[in-house]
Image (cartoon, grey):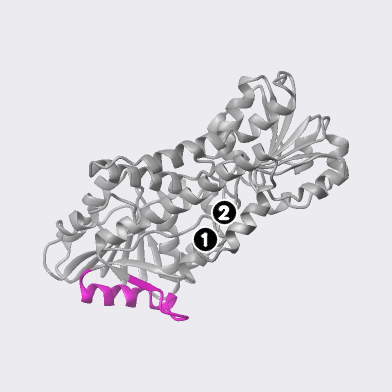
Amino acid sequence: MRIIVHGSELSAATAAAALSSVGHQVDWWPHEEAPWAQLAEADWLAREPGVPAQLEASRQGGSLRLVDSLDTLGEVDIAWLALAPDQRDAAERFVDAVAQRQDSPLIVINNSTFPVGQTESLEGLLRHASQVAVVLPDMLEEGRAWQVFTRPTRWLLGCEDDWAADQVRELLRAFNRRAEVFQRMPRRAAELTKLAINGMLATRISYMNEVAGLADSLGVDVEHVRQGMGADTRIGYEYLYPGCGFGGSNFSRDLMRLADVQYATGRESHLLEQVLDINEHKKETLFRKLWGHFHGQLEGRTVAIWGAAFKPGTTRIDHAPVLTLLRALWAQGVHVRLHDPAALSTLKQRLGEHPLLTLCADDPYSACEGADALMLVTEWKCYWNPDWRRLSDMLGAKLILDGRNIYDPVYVAARGLVYRGIGRRANP
């Protein structure tokens, strides 16, 4: 098939790479705010496993072409929209421009997170009955985008037209061989489902964080509670891990989009408001534990932080808990020594130079030099099994603040360290 992909999101890059890898002829037109010259230098794309290599291979093989306008394009079979939520105007301009040039049948695939009903509006820009707009919500995960796209567990397909559904199936046939992965539904239902999924996941995380706070107050190890809840088949284990808050641009934007959808219908979103408030509050959890341990005497102390990215496997720090944590620590005059295996340049670009921040690129232990305590914020694999004897010698107060509950409290305490997690604790 002949495909034009428009957008500069991870979903656009992944679609261009994956579709061109299986024989389709793909033209990729990045959004003007992030042209290819900028994307080629972006850390978040360079570190996405599989995607950059396939983009280059497809360009070299001729199945992928980078374009900066529609002027060089002929007619296409598929127009794939993978734009940011605030780029609706660009989506409408693109669809209108493609439709003007096109007399043959056309499928517009909306892979963007726009308001519910936007796909129907895009179809209104098309010219005749054999031009149809469908919804294929973006379900990618940063750090696993290639795997999720090429070996999907499911695709949500919002489509009322049988012919268009068949065309989408043909487009993605190479990724639909192990088992049937398409779940078809009306377009508005698919748009709302994408938002509702992230709303539910965020609610589970926030609820578990509330339980962890209660466990702290009652002297209960929240890990026992998590195991007990997860063993109930009505609940399961997924997204029941308490932590110091979630971040990420896509997740946060989807939650705000869901809230906007509810407000637009005249329904107040009390639950979603609470979920968002709980998450923002949890981003200061490690600071409050530090404050409590030192009885508020924080000025002049030094704290090591492991992890800045909002999740392992990415360089992004959008809405990351570390940003809230840094502001709270600096307000108390705490010097921070921070290590992250991938996101330091992003953090420096975002924050610039700060007199109370030292970025440590060498190894995780360099961040602990002269520190009183260590905060684990992002659960990168390189942090899972540290040298506890070395940490005990390096940390002045021998305090470990585990924001992701990846360590065994009893084991850490047996090494002579004070352990404080999210709903978990142990003393030497």
Residue 356 coordinates in the image, percent (x, y): 67, 23
Quadrant into which the N terminus falls: bottom left
Q: Quadrant of residue 196?
A: bottom left
> Could you tell whether 220 is left or right of 41 in the image?
right
Quadrant into which the C terminus falls: top right
Q: Residue at x 26, y 56 (%)?
A: 70
Q: Residue at x 46, y 70 (%)?
A: 152
Identity of the amino acid at label 2? Leu
Residue 76 coordinates in the image, percent (x, y): 25, 68
Q: Residue at x 20, y 56 (%)?
A: 122
Q: Residue furthest front?
A: 218
> Could you tell whether 260 is left or right of 37 in the image?
left
Q: Nearer the viewer, residue 272 or 157?
A: 272
> Could you tell whether 298 is left or right of 93 in the image?
right
- In the rendered structure, which disc, 1 or 2, sits on the residue that comes first in sequence? 1
Residue 246 coordinates in the image, percent (x, y): 53, 44
**Magenta span:** 160-183
Total marks in image: 2
- Pointer 1 residue: 235
Q: Is residue 380 visible?
A: no
> Could you tell whether 123 is left or right of 345 in the image?
left
How far apart are the two marked residues, 1 and 2, measured between alpha carbons? 9 Å
Q: Quadrant of residue 291?
A: top right
Instruction: Kindly check if marks 1 and 2 are in contact, taking CB atoms under 8 A apart as contact.
Output: yes
179 relative to 222, above or below: below
